[in-house]
Image: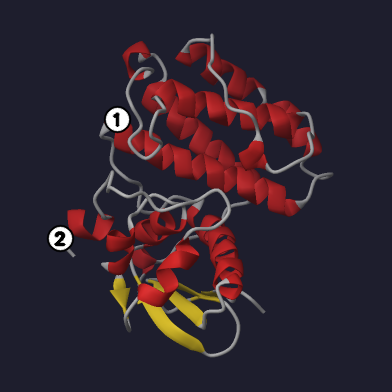
Amino acid sequence: MSTDRRHDATAPAANRWERWPDHLAYRNSRENITELTGGRPEAASLPVPACPGWTVLDAVGHLVAIGRAVAADAPGNLWEVPHAGFDASLDELLTEWAALDAPMAKVVTTTPQLRHTMMMMDALTHELDIRRALGAPVPHDHPSYPSSLDLVVRGLANSVREHGLPALRIETPGGQWQAGDGEPGATVHGHRHDLLRSLTGRRTHRQISDLDWSTDPGPWLPAFTWGPFDPPAEASEASEASAAGQ
């Protein structure tokens, strides 16, 4: 198997998480973003450092475009949904996004589970992007973390295999995974938020290297470029572990 996730039932309660169904976790991100940006027209033009060239309006518009594609059961990879300028205001986009709940629910039982998980992970990723843009705190116990990490570790596992690398064990308080096949050649440990950001193209190679590795991370760094994700050349955010003084 390319990935192996284990939930640590013995972990302290503060370090454990509970998995929500993807559609509920996705809705949680939508509601969080609406609470963060609704009624704040000045937020629309704020730049999103994790997505160079994008504003908060662009990020929300992207999420609405994904919602439209899912509601229409459109084929293709969600990260290939065209992104273009948006004539609507931020509040108008948020209203449309909420209205897509019902049509999206109708296709939940007829589309592959992987697509739902990708949509949920994308919403969490951009929620975190928007939080950084607004200077809002990072949620430590977001219900999208477990399935999102499961998904992105699968992507990393494919990349590890394509690069001909030994497997990588990934650990955070309350959970662990294996990316790749056979005996792991290294273990990386970090805060769940830092791991997710590292696996979704939001952290530089230097920041990924600064996670807690059991050996030289150099051979595995190229594998962190996969799918739509590519580590940036310059850091756009600090690690959560550093912010917490860990």
What percent of the width, then of the height, locates residue 219? 41, 76
Which residue is depicted at the point 25% across and 34% down? 135
* Image quadrant assignment for residue 27: top right
21 to 188, vertically: above or below: above
Sequence-first disc among 1 and 2: 1
Which residue is depicted at the point 74% across and 30% down? 71
* Image quadrant assignment for residue 120: top right
Residue bearing mark 1: 134
Given residues 225 and 105, the one toward you in this image is 225
What percent of the width, then of the height, locates residue 15? 36, 66
Which residue is depicted at the point 57% across and 41% down? 26
Judge whether residue 197 can be spotted in this image. yes
Quadrant the C terminus occupies: bottom left
Looking at the image, residue 214 sits to the left or right of residue 30; the answer is: left
Which residue is farthest left? 245
User: Neighbour class for label 1 at 10 Å: few (<14), some, many (≥20)?
Assistant: some
Residue bearing mark 2: 245
Judge whether residue 11 can be spotted in this image. no
Residue kind at label 2, given as amino acid type: Gly
Callout 1: SS = helix
Question: How much space separates mark 1 and mark 2, taking CA atoms?
Answer: 22 Å
Looking at the image, residue 127 sits to the left or right of residue 205; the answer is: right
